[in-house]
Image (cartoon, coloured by chain):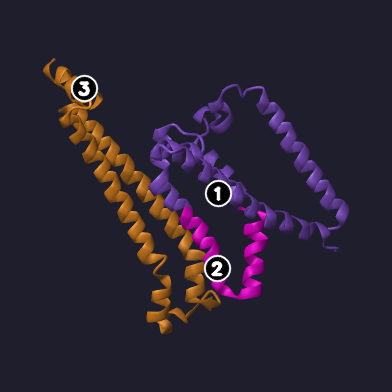
Chain colours: A purple, B orange
Amino acid sequence: MNSSAGLTAVLVISVATLAIGAYGWRFSRTTSDFFVASRSVGPALNASAIGGEYLSAASFLGVAGLVLAFGTDMLWYPVGWTAGYLMLLVLVAAPLRRSGAYTLPDFAEGRLESTQVRRLSSLLVVVFGWLKLMPQRQGLRAPLRTPS
Amino acid sequence: MAGRSRRVAAAWEIDAQTRIGEIYMASLLRAQLRLAVTVVLTVAVFVAGLPLFFWLLPRIMAQRLWGMPLSWVLLGFAVYPFLLVVAWVYVQAAERNERDFADVVERS
């Protein structure tokens, strides 16, 4: 892939994302609309959305690179992420849904009745979001720069 | 109908948070907790326990399947359908618990 094809792909995806966002803007009125589409998204569509997020530069290129650099022990990383989803389903999903909270900090605050827990939880979200985005950006850069 | 008036009574016990309502709720929560613990233990034994199987059964794990050692097949591929099946069974069982609870509340 040469750099102009890469640039075009990035542009197309950016414009498509903005267009979908602008389209959805007209229907989003309440908090419930904004965070969970008013709970109107079915399991199959929701799973596709989570899957689309999961199959990212970090999981695709990252795991391949880790196996190449450190050997097959690195196959444990994606196993851990996937088993993590199962733990979420088994331990968190039902109480989270019943509590009516939209975000994990919301839920932690409601469950433990502590603003400090909410702050700590928000901080963790930001820190882990950062740790995930950094290699993600790095991973994105790699295929775009590779000359063919 | 007698059944109908008694159905209201069972739901009322829970809504009013009486002792007996608490017992109804506790039985559902206990069933769901027992299910969750079972799932966590299953994953702990069969997924987190894989290194133990690799260590205990080196001869079997070194056998080649589709051109790679069995341990790679298990860790790289077989784990995912296994987790999917566990998740599916969990959801079925959790919904069955809820249905059973609803039946009990409606019938009592």
Q: Which element type, helix, strand or loop, lies under badge 2?
A: helix
Residue A41 at what x, y percent from top left? 53, 33
| Nearer-the-camera pick, A122 or B65 | A122
Q: Residue A66: within the magenta?
A: yes
Q: Cα distance, mark 1 to mark 2? A: 25 Å
Q: Cα distance, mark 1 to mark 3? A: 41 Å
**Dot 3 falls on which chain?**
B
Query: Split into 4 quadrants, where in the image is the N terminus of chain B?
Result: top left
Q: Cα distance, mark 3 to mark 2? A: 52 Å
Residue receiving disc 3: B12
Segment tinted magenta in the rendering:
A55-84
A42 sits to left or right of A113: right
Are the residues flagged by discs 1 and 3 from a single subunit?
Answer: no
The vertical placement of A12 against A145, above or below, is above
The vertical placement of A53 against A110, above or below, is below
Question: Which mark lies nearer to you, 1 or 3?
Answer: 1
Residue receiving disc 2: A75
Q: Which element type, helix, strand or loop, lies under badge 3?
A: helix
**Dot 2 falls on which chain?**
A
